[in-house]
Structures are given as C-alpha cells and as structure tokens.
Amino acid sequence: METDITQIPLTKETHCVHLKTLPFMPAVFCRLLALSLVRKPALPADTRVCRGKLLLPGFVPDPDKVDRYSKVCGFFRTQQDKIIPPSCLQTLFIGMLGRYITSNFFPINPMGLIQTGQSFASKHPVMVNDLLDLSCTLQDMTRTPKGIVTRFCLEIHRENTLVWQGISTYLTRDPGRVPPKKMPSPDQPLPIQKTIPVPENTGRRYARVSGDYNPHHLSAATAKLIGFKKAIAHGMWSLARTLACLEETMPFSHPFCVDAAFKLPIYLPATLTLGYENVLGAKGQVRFELRDADKGLPHLKGTLHLQDQEN
C-alpha cells in the first residue's frame, strides 16, 4: 500500500552554531516577516536539508520571568520555591527556534509554521539559579498530505547532565496539496474535572512571559491579518494551564514525561473544560484533554506519565 508520507533527507553532518545570548526577538520577527515574502511553503522533490544545531551555553533563567509565567499559567509557587515549572523550560527556546527558522538552515516559509504538538521529559528538577546549556536541533522533516511536518529536539544540560528534553512539532501547510477527507473518528470525552475561564488578554499575557509575540495571539485585529477571526491562545499556554491543574491533585515529585497534541484553536475569550482519567493497566499514566465548554470540541489532548525515580 502506497503512502503519501515521505522523509525529507537531511545532511549526515550536523552544522553547529554557538550563540552568546538568546536572540533579540524584535530582530527575529523582522527577519521572519521579510522571509515570509520570498520563501515558499513547499520544497522541490530532490531537496536535501541541512541538519543544523544551535547551542547556547551558560544560560541562567530569570527568576522574575519564571514567577510571572507561573501566575499566567496558574502554577502555585511560594517565594521560597526555586523549581522552574517544566513546561516553562520550553519558553527558553522561543528565541532559538525563531533564530533557526529564519536562518539559512531552514528552507521553507517561517511564517507558515503551526505548532501541532509538544512532548517533553523532565528528568531532574531545574532551579532558577542553575547554569544551563541549551541546544536546539532539527530532528526531521516529513512530507505529509497536509504539508511538511518539522520536528525540533530541544535539550537542557546542567553540568553535562541532561535534565530536560523536548520535541516541538510544527506543520507547514502546502496550498498546492489537498489532503484526503477523513471520516471523523469516535471522540468520547474524558470525565470533566474542572472548568477553566480564559480571559481575552491571555495571549498578550503569555506573550510577555514566553517571548512568543505571533500576531494571531495578540488581538482580534492582528489575528485577522493572517486569517483568524479572533485572537487565539498559545498552544503551550493551554498545555501549561492543564499541567498546573493536574499538579494540584498529583504533585510531580518524580521524573515525568508529557506528550500533547494541539487540536482546534482556542478563540479568546473562552471557557474550557479539563477532563482527565488514569489509564487502565498503566501505573502512573493519565490521559487529559481540554474542550470547549459549550460545544465540546477538542483543543488539546495528551498523556502524562509519572515515572519511577530509578528510571
């Protein structure tokens, strides 16, 4: 049986670029806008893409930004709490991801990227005063009926020990391809455990603590410029808000991993329901989802796996 899913070949050699500081986001967005006018969302069939890697050694997280992130996403923290919420660590890479997709390493339109998934493994707690080494590597690119799927591997090392590892997944739609229509699969909601109001300014608040100022998150006016009827919440905010709620009932005291898929956009303002349940026969595993409170449409689905300390 033929498939319309093929890997785009990458160079065997990984080309490394060492950064001295996190990229300056206004400059990244200016370059992103300029490249969006000249780069196409598709690639010729015989393209081989350079496998690149950005490295930033000696980074120390900003305690004030971590505190503000925690408030925006609903994490409970005391003044003595120095542990960074693991989902917050993904925001350290916003600038590096922006730098990567606007570099010569990345050959397709950077404006077209839509984040469709995020997974991460939190192996050890990370503190606000830790000295961290960050790396962002192109993991793979795949042609699919919907367009090109790109995955980046994000890693944080402390004293040469891997403490956090994430995979960020993005889709670039190809306007020249029409994906086959699929019958919707049965979608049984999980038991509702909590109702979450989402204010209209959530996108702007999250942008200030994450650095992700994509226009479709900021206001209805800027969202309409790129085809959205209203501003939408960041997918990573929805995942962080979910984890903050789960942490209230199941403290993440052991290493754990999360795998989440972003579904339909959350138009702001909104009211969401959080559903979750334990996975039968799988110790320490929880399925979770966010849905629209009125229509029951899914915005986020994922799993959380609390691991044994020796793993």
Image (cartoon, rainbow, N blue to C red):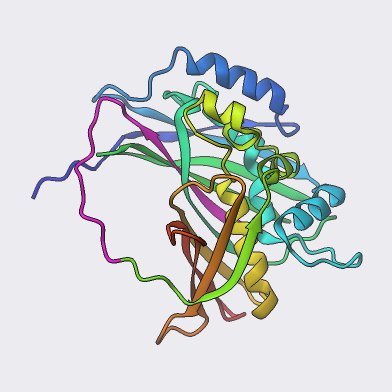
Which residue is at a point 24% across and 39% down the rendered structure image? 145
Magenta-drawn stretch contains 178: yes
Q: Residue at x 68, y 46 (%)?
A: 202
Residue 231 image position (x, y, % from top left): 58, 38
**How far from the left and from the top, in percent, is residue 286?**
50, 76
Residue 308 visible somewhere in the drawing: yes
Q: Is residue 247 left or right of residue 208?
A: left
Which residue is rendered at x = 23% and y = 39% of the image? Answer: 179
Q: Observer-nearest residue: 3 or 203?
A: 203
Q: Is residue 114 left or right of residue 133?
A: left
Instruction: State whether residue 253 appears in this view.
Output: no
* Vertical position of residue 99 compared to residue 72: above or below: above
Which residue of the protein is positioned furthest toward the right in this rendering?
79
Q: Residue furthest left?
A: 1
Q: Which residues are magenta?
A: 164-186
Q: Nearer the viewer, residue 53 or 259?
A: 259
